[in-house]
Image: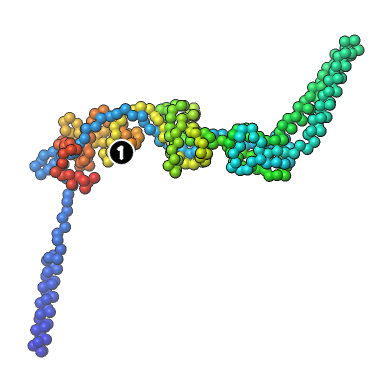
Amino acid sequence: MNPTRKKSILIATGITVVVALWMLSGLGSSPVEFTTAPSVSDATGEPMRVRVERISANEVTREIVISARTEPNRYVRLKAETDGAVVALMADRGSPVAEGETILELDMRDRNARLSETDSLVDQRELELQARQNLRNREFASEVEIAEAKARLESARAARARIALELDNISIDAPFAGLVQERSVEIGDYVRAGDTVVDIVDIDPLIIAGDINGKEVSELYVGSRGTAVLVNGTQLNGIIRYLAPVADENTRTFRVELEVPNPANIRAGLTAELQLEGSRISAHDISPSLLTLADDGTVGVKTVNSANRVDFYPVEIAGATTDGILVTGLPTDVTVITVGQGFVTVGQQVEPVSNNATLESNAAYERAD
């Protein structure tokens, strides 16, 4: 073998061996550092330090929030009260109408002629009755004849009243101010008594209606104030006008209606959130991050008592504030754990540190939070 080639093979072999040994020795990477969560005490066995804050309860009005929808104040379906063909339409769908305004008219047909006929018949029956009474005074007519004359007169008057009522019913008027929701007829359509002709809705005031459970309905009363927030963010303020006296058989909830002014004609049928003023309660305003779960899933807050031991209080969320939530179930004045609650257990001895102080293990707590 050529000495030069032999030397090259030996050099290549040596380089390969060196690279293999370097990779196996791990010289090409840094060791990964693992951090562990703080233990219940430090290395010296001292109690764990936790950050705490002293808070007090305040008297607040509990806010009850339920899902709701906008509804019209009134909705009526007008029907024809006499027969006839439609000869005039004064309002289209969606147009506003005033109370008493004529919406459509039916044809007169022979009603004027029939009214004149009944007027004449009434006059005739009155004269007949008067003649019978005169004869009775001279004993030429019996009581029976007079009674018959009176009956014929009343029958004529009733016929005239029926015709007059038909004349009144040929025009269909709005029973209240509102908007035309639907119109079922057009010019030339023939309608009979009882046929639906037009639907009228009144949406000013607007009604915000929802369903509330039996526990919360006892906190409300007719006349109390509330706010409705529509899907587009619009807020409407009003008062409760109705609370159902009986629960719905299927849902066991009670209907509640908030009445709000609606000069802008906001439509009915929109989804809304109803915020109602409930009872006055004593509650704490805390950050949602302070809430923890017990082993059984109970939501609560961990606190530190006078012996510097951890307590757990189940709480109930009573509402929301600008910066946090309102909870009930805590003592009036209490020291809550704001940092480190996830690393301590009920009954554990701790060293509380004010929120204004700096904890040595602050970084570990921040990672845990």
Q: Is residue 179 left or right of residue 20?
A: right
Front residue of 176 and 248 = 176
**Which residue is found at the position 10% from the left and 80% from the top?**
11
Quadrant showing the N terminus? bottom left
The location of residue 84, given as percent across then percent down, is 74, 39
* 303 lies above or below 23: above
Residue 194 can be seen in this image: no
Q: Is residue 294 left or right of residue 173?
A: left
The location of residue 231, given as percent across then percent down, is 44, 43
Front residue of 338 and 232 = 232
**Which residue is found at the position 72% from the left and 35% from the top?**
170
* Displayed quadrant of residue 135: top right
Residue at the right extreme?
140
Instruction: Tell me which colouring the rendered structure shows.
Output: rainbow
Q: Is residue 356 left or right of residue 260?
A: left
**Which residue is found at the position 83% from the left and 20% from the top?**
126
Residue 65 can be seen in this image: yes
The location of residue 242, given as percent across then percent down, is 49, 29
* Displayed quadrant of residue 25: bottom left
Residue neighbourhood size for the residue with mark 1, other residues' Cα within 10 Å, grouped as few (<14), some (14–19), many (≥20): few
Residue picked out by circle 1: 323
The location of residue 24, given as percent across then percent down, is 13, 67
Q: Secondary structure at mark 1?
A: loop
